[in-house]
Amino acid sequence: MTVYRNILVIRLSSLGDVLLTMPAVQAIKAACPASAVSWLVEGPSSELLACQEFIDRVIEFPRGAITKSLRKGRFFSAAANLLAFRSALRRQAYDLVVDFHGIVKSALLAWAARAQRRLGFDGSVAKEGSWLAYDERQQASDRRLHKSMRNMLLASRLGAGVLPEVDLKTPPEAAAYIDAFFAQKAISGPVIAVNPFCSKGSAFKRWDMDRYADLVRCVGNATGATMMVLWGPGEEEEAAGLVRGAGGRAMLACPTTVAQLLALLKRTDLYVGGDTGVMHLAAFARVPIVAIFGPTDHLVNGPVGTGHTIVRKDLPCSPCRDKTCKDRICLRSITVDEVSAAVVGAWSRIGKG
């Protein structure tokens, strides 16, 4: 069996996809325990990755700095940042690069790294011709295979076994921050976390906000739990509107980083929301989930683990990838009563009802 001293893993974004790559990376580390595993990522997920014992080094691609320079027309500054990053990346030689992302950007980064071997998916998964950068290509013929299992196909090429159960770590300061918030708000009873949001590019997956307000009110009255509305950057005002619309049956969560949000989720008893990265974070926090699925495929994108409830409509047009759909019948046909019944049922199953 080949011995790898240094392995570079590439999965740049988004939060959900980074999380669904973690089991495969942990499996690679278990199969190659003598290897130093580095992860190339961009954005706020880097803080969370840095806390995990199976990741030896986190390399952050400076997307924010490069984008900021380009928006201001500072093209030389953007080029300088990119060249400096490339130079820093090439200081370390890798025996193997594993590109889980499979887009032209990740492929260029895989090619820029000094590596003896590059592994990625073939055209069945990889996009934009990125597979041309790999020495070895893995086929994924089952298009409805869950993403975590699909990522394991790459790990299995390196001798990894079954899909591991990842125990995500949080930094002590993140847990202390959440403890202080719970103490300040005098939260002592059970908590149901509700996340009505999706990323800007995923609004087509979002259930209507007024329905979330009705849901929070119904579930809060039925369970007596503290209903906590989660929010991220740029979402506080809309989240506050949801709290008002719920007639006093909800409260706002504190502002959080990804690591702090994980610590918060570990303090909750149930999570309710759509197909988002935060849903996956809740799953990795071992929180039972009631997930509202519309156009996306629950078999591919559902939460990992057991004990979760998926609320969806089995329609001829779903799942689909039409982000421009105006009807959104897959979501609009899901009623407040249906989701409320699913949440109360899940509440009873975990011994809270």
Image (cartoon, grey):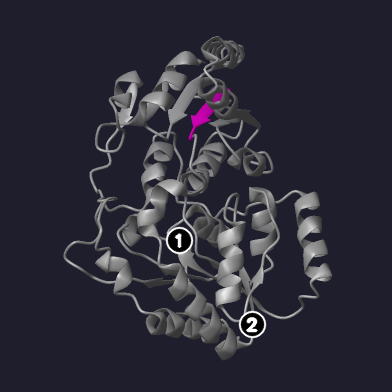
User: Is 128 on the left-hand or right-hand side of 217?
Assistant: left
Quickly name the residue at label 2. Answer: 225
Inspect this view and state whether residue 4 appears. Answer: no
Report how many numbered discs are placed on residues in the image: 2
Please determine whether, in this image, residue 147 is positioned above or below residue 239. above
**In the image, what residue occupies the spot 40% across and 61% down?**
206
Please determine whether, in this image, residue 20 is positioned above or below residue 43. below
x and y, in percent, of residue 267 in the image = 69, 67
Residue stretch in magenta: 5-11
Q: Look at the numbered disc 1 and give the secondary structure of its residue.
A: loop
**In the image, what residue occupies the spot 61% across and 11% down?**
91
Query: Distance from label 2 to label 1 (Cα)?
Result: 23 Å
Q: Is residue 164 magenta?
A: no
Dominant SS type (magenta): strand
Q: Look at the numbered disc 2 and give the secondary structure of its residue.
A: loop
Residue nearest the viewer, comparing 285 with 215? 215
* Residue count near mark 1 (Cα–Cα under 10 Å), binned few <14, some 14–19, many ≥20: many
Quickly name the residue at label 1. Answer: 303
Foreground disc of the pair 2, 1: 2
Lower sequence index among marks 2 and 1: 2
Three-letter code, disc 2: Ala
